[in-house]
Image (cartoon, rainbow, N blue to C red):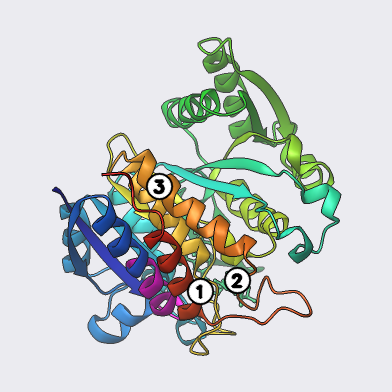
Amino acid sequence: DKQYKVTVLPGDGIGPEIVEEGVKVLKQAGKQFGYRFQLDFGLVGGGAIDRVQTPLPQETLRQCRDADAVLLGAVGGPDWDQNPPELRPEKALLDLRKKLGLFANLRPVQCFPGLEESSTLKKDVVNGVDLLVVRELTGGIYFGEKYTEKTGKGEKATDTLVYQEHEVERIMRRGFELARKRRKKVTSVDKANVLESSRLWRKVAQRVARDYPDVELEHMLVDNCAMQMIRRPAEFDVIVTENMFGDILSDESAVLTGSIGMLPSASIGEGTKGLYEPVHGSAPDIAGQGVSNPVATILSVAMMFRHSFQDEEAARTIEHAVINVLAQGARTMDVAVPGDLALSTDQMGDRVVEELKKRQPDP
Ligand code: NAD
Ligand code: IPM
Ligand code: MN
């Protein structure tokens, strides 16, 4: 048997309910593909602040360092929104990403068959969308120097956007490598008409591209990209971009799939250790009702098999199970259209597990 340690961090809001479905799928796929998992549950975010006065307890960090992969739900919520920066749930995520060296955040966006009607965009526009946002995750404006000071003219707040050449280079290479296995096109997104860091970004993109003559490189300014993404999204293959641009563009791209409840993510570094989490947040507006969409988390589990366990077959089997149940009309409230009977979070997870069971690999 293949043995792996997975640390599970349910977090806040809808975190626990979606993670429960992700774990169901992890266990079922593990059973079918010959894995033995050691699951280790930990505290993170608001729940950790309430219990031990810190968003990322030492013990949780240790559990994550010790693990082959981490599955995280979401953190944050109105209870903690007035807290100082170090005592905000979101700080846990930033620290985890940085301390584990997870500089590459992969956010695949696909419009699955049958969900074209769930998008608020026209069917023709979202049909065939299959893109990958490669977001730089441990640099940029999220991690630059930041401070607030009092001045004679009132408060002054500063955030700095810093990139080193090697940081741009490694994320760019990752983007090109991934594009090579896809449709061989990289769109490097920046704001080079205004930002110095973007001019460096663009220069490095051009240099890295020389090592990948089989991959086409285009540059796009981020404001234009935000527009092209909803105008002709099917033309994008791999988008490589700065931390905050990637954050914003990936939420925008959720509209192409019908809901942010559909978007998974993998955060990886140089090795195979990874942090897997949905792109969405803790959704305080629907938390506790059992109506949230667990698909983003389930697809994140598929990415865990792909990137941390290097098991493409298991990853695809989970993805196909999701595609099949959606094609059969199974869907949660966020992607349901008038006439659909929406499933609850756990019903949706159960449907994926049942579908997986039908796909036992050949002995
Ligand atoms: P959000 O992603 O939590 O919610 C945005 C909208 O999408 C809401 O209407 C919500 O109901 C809906 N939604 C999100 N996930 C869904 C799902 N699985 N199924 C159905 N609908 C879903 O973003 P927000 O409201 O801006 O942020 C809420 C909190 O989450 C904030 O504290 C924020 O900091 C935090 N946050 C955390 C993460 C994370 O942990 N990775 C990511 C984003 C936001
Ligand atoms: C995300 C989230 C986080 C981010 C927040 C919660 C820190 O929005 O994972 O997309 O901005 O990276
Ligand atoms: Mn985000």
Query: Mark 3 sits on what residue?
Result: 315
Pick whichever of labels 1 and 2 is earlier in the sequence: 2
Q: Residues within 10 Å of mark 2 (few under 14, many from 20)?
A: many
**Residue closest to the eye, 32 or 149:** 32
CB under 8 Å between discs 3 and 1: no
Q: Is residue 21 magenta?
A: yes
At 27% from the left and 36% from the top, the residue drawn is: 271
* Residue 128, quarter of the rendered image: top right
Pick whichever of labels 3 and 2 is earlier in the sequence: 3
Give the CA separation, mark 3 to mark 1. 18 Å
At 56% from the left and 29% from the top, the residue drawn is: 182
At 77% from the left and 47% from the top, the residue drawn is: 127
What kind of residue is marked 1? Met
What kind of residue is marked 3? Ala
Pick whichever of labels 3 and 1 is earlier in the sequence: 3
What kind of residue is marked 2? Ala
Q: Residues within 10 Å of mark 1 (few under 14, many from 20)?
A: many
Ligand 1 within 8 Å, label 1 CB: no
Q: Which residues are magenta?
A: 12-23
Query: Mark 2 sits on what residue?
Result: 330
**Residue closest to the eye, 125 or 140:** 125
Q: Position of residue 73 (x, y in %)?
A: 41, 69
Residue 98, numbered label: none
Q: Is residue 170 left or right of residue 191?
A: left
Q: Position of residue 286 (x, y in %)?
A: 57, 85
Query: Mark 1 sits on what residue?
Result: 348
